[in-house]
Image: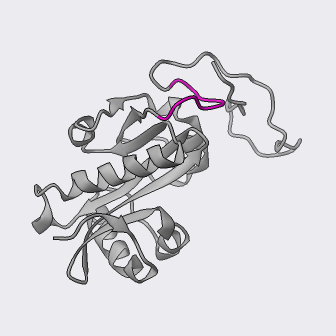
């Protein structure tokens, strides 16, 4: 069995098939071919020969936050440390590039807790909720558990302390908001600031 390594463009079809085999069972979200192609640099894979037997992606959400997503291991390769190797590869890369917090949305919270992830309210991940989650077919009734892991990366400008509940954000409109933009009822646009 191989070690975790960065995915190549030739892995996209196998990643798509692997991820969507679990999505078809309701165990994770489906990913389109175009989404995997667009984000191939985010993916790590483990190969057995030429076959991709596992994958995971580290997707940067903001300067201080990234997400591990699309973690999938073929059923006959599970319980052999392959998933753990992928999570470690994602966390290592996050540290190397200076991302101080990594989160995931999962049905397997006990697995991620082994790596120092702790449960977190999804609404504390507002960047995720309003950039990707709103497109999910399960939104707003998501039944996945949000977890977050703080990494030691030194001082980080604009860092939100994910280890505690942040102070209330500013209610100023962002500069990209224009009068007439459609905003869901009771939704506000927040500017994040250092607590």
When the figure is inspected, residue 166 is found, relative to residue 98, above or below; the finding is above
Question: Is residue 93 shown left or right of residue 21?
Answer: right
Residue 96: where, in percent of width, then height? 47, 48
Question: Is residue 189 shown left or right of residue 105?
Answer: right
Residue in view at x 11 percent, y 58 percent: 80
Residue 43: where, in percent of width, then height? 42, 64
Q: Main secondary structure of the magenta part?
A: loop
Residue 109: where, in percent of width, then height? 26, 39
Tell me, yes or no, if residue 5 can be seen here. yes
When the figure is inspected, residue 109 is found, relative to residue 161, above or below; the finding is below
Question: Is residue 10 shown left or right of residue 177?
Answer: left
Number of callouts: 0
**Is 158 included in the stretch rendered in magenta?**
yes
Residue in view at x 42 percent, y 77 percent: 8
User: For residue 2, which quarter of the picture?
Assistant: bottom left
Tell me, yes or no, if residue 139 can be seen here. no
How does the figure colour the protein chain or chains? Answer: one colour
Residue 60: where, in percent of width, then height? 54, 50
Q: Which residues are magenta?
A: 153-161
Residue in view at x 72 percent, y 33 percent: 189
When the figure is inspected, residue 6 is found, relative to residue 134, above or below; the finding is below
**Is 175 included in the stretch rendered in magenta?**
no
């Amino acid at each position: 069995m191989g070690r975790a390594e960065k995915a190549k463009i030739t892995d996209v079809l196998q990643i798509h098939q692997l991820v969507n085999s679990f999505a078809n069972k309701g165990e994770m979200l489906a990913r389109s071919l175009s989404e995997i192609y667009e984000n191939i640099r985010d993916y790590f894979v483990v190969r057995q020969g030429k076959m991709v037997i596992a994958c995971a992606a580290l997707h940067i959400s903001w300067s201080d936050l990234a997400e591990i997503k699309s973690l999938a291991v073929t059923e006959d390769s599970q319980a052999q440390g392959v998933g753990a190797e992928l999570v470690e590869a994602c966390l290592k890369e996050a540290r190397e590039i200076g991302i101080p917090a990594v989160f995931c949305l999962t049905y397997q919270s006990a697995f991620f807790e082994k790596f120092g992830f702790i449960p977190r309210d999804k609404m504390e991940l507002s960047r995720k909720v309003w950039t990707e989650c709103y497109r999910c077919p399960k939104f707003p009734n998501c039944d996945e558990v949000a977890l977050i892991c703080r990494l030691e990366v030194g001082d980080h400008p604009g860092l939100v302390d994910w280890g505690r509940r942040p102070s209330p954000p500013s209610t100023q409109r962002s500069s990209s908001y224009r009068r007439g933009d459609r905003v869901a009822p009771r939704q506000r646009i927040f500017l994040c600031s250092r607590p």
